[in-house]
Image (tube, helix red, strand yellow):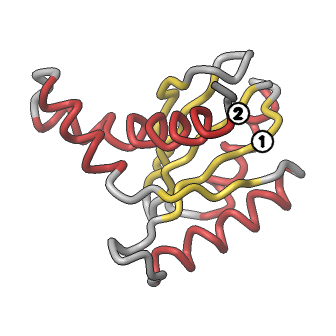
């Protein structure tokens, strides 16, 4: 059971994938895009290549739990992704995932230039780990 994790942004999407048993997550790639259809096509190809069964997308709620423009954008993108792939898309609260990814990369000694290139896929892995840990019985 492979699960795809996404950190969806307006210009980049961080992508993470679970192991075949759906226990762990690892960053896979970052998709840079200018057109939405381009990103949807790349994600659909990744889903097919890895035999993904479901997709988890981070929902960028405000710190007080309210929704803003970013939430509307992600929800709209998630609906289109579901149509393109035919897979269920599950939304997960992603508050602080990007900040946690940044802290992890800094503590690992990564320089600022290198962090920018991988922060989104690390955030996607954190979002996917949140989902997997909640979905896995103790």
Q: Quadrant of the C terminus?
A: top right
User: Neighbour class for label 2 at 10 Å: few (<14), some, many (≥20)?
Assistant: many
Please identify the quarter of the rendering in which residue 83 is found: bottom right
User: Neighbour class for label 1 at 10 Å: few (<14), some, many (≥20)?
Assistant: some
Secondary structure beneath label 2: strand
User: Toward the viewer: 124 or 38?
Assistant: 124
Q: Is residue 137 left or right of residue 49?
A: left
User: Toward the viewer: 49 or 101?
Assistant: 101
Secondary structure beneath label 1: strand
Q: CA distance from mark 2 to mark 1?
A: 5 Å
The residue at 47%/28% (across/down) is: 27
User: Toward the viewer: 17 or 90?
Assistant: 90
Relative to 4, residue 37 above or below: below
Mark 2 and mark 1 residues within 8 Å of each other at the beta carbon: yes
Relative to 7, residue 63 above or below: below
Task: Residue lying at the far right in this picture: please name it.
Answer: 86
The residue at 65%/67% (across/down) is: 77
Q: Is residue 79 left or right of residue 72?
A: right
Task: Residue lying at the far front in this picture: please name it.
Answer: 138
Q: Earlier in the sequence, mark 2 or mark 1?
A: 2
What x and y, as percent, mark residue 137? 69, 28
The residue at 21%/30% (across/down) is: 105
What x and y, as percent, mark residue 132? 61, 34
The residue at 61%/28% (across/down) is: 17
Residue marked by disc 2: 3
Residue marked by disc 1: 54
Please identify the quarter of the rendering in which residue 111 is found: top left
Q: Is residue 25 left or right of residue 102?
A: right
What x and y, as percent, mark residue 11? 43, 60
């Amino acid at each position: 059971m492979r699960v795809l994790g996404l950190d969806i942004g307006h210009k980049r999407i961080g992508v993470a994938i679970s192991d075949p048993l759906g226990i762990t997550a690892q960053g896979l790639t970052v998709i840079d895009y200018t057109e939405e259809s381009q990103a949807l096509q790349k994600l659909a190809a990744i889903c097919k290549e890895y035999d993904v069964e479901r997709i988890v997308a981070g929902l960028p709620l405000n710190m007080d739990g309210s929704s803003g423009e970013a939430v509307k954008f992600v929800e709209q993108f998630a609906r289109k992704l579901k149509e393109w792939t035919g897979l269920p898309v599950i939304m997960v609260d992603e508050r602080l995932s990007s900040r946690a990814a940044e802290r992890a990369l800094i503590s690992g000694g990564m320089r600022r230039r290198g962090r920018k290139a991988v922060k989104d896929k690390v955030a996607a892995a954190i979002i996917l780990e949140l989902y997997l840990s909640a979905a896995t019985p103790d």
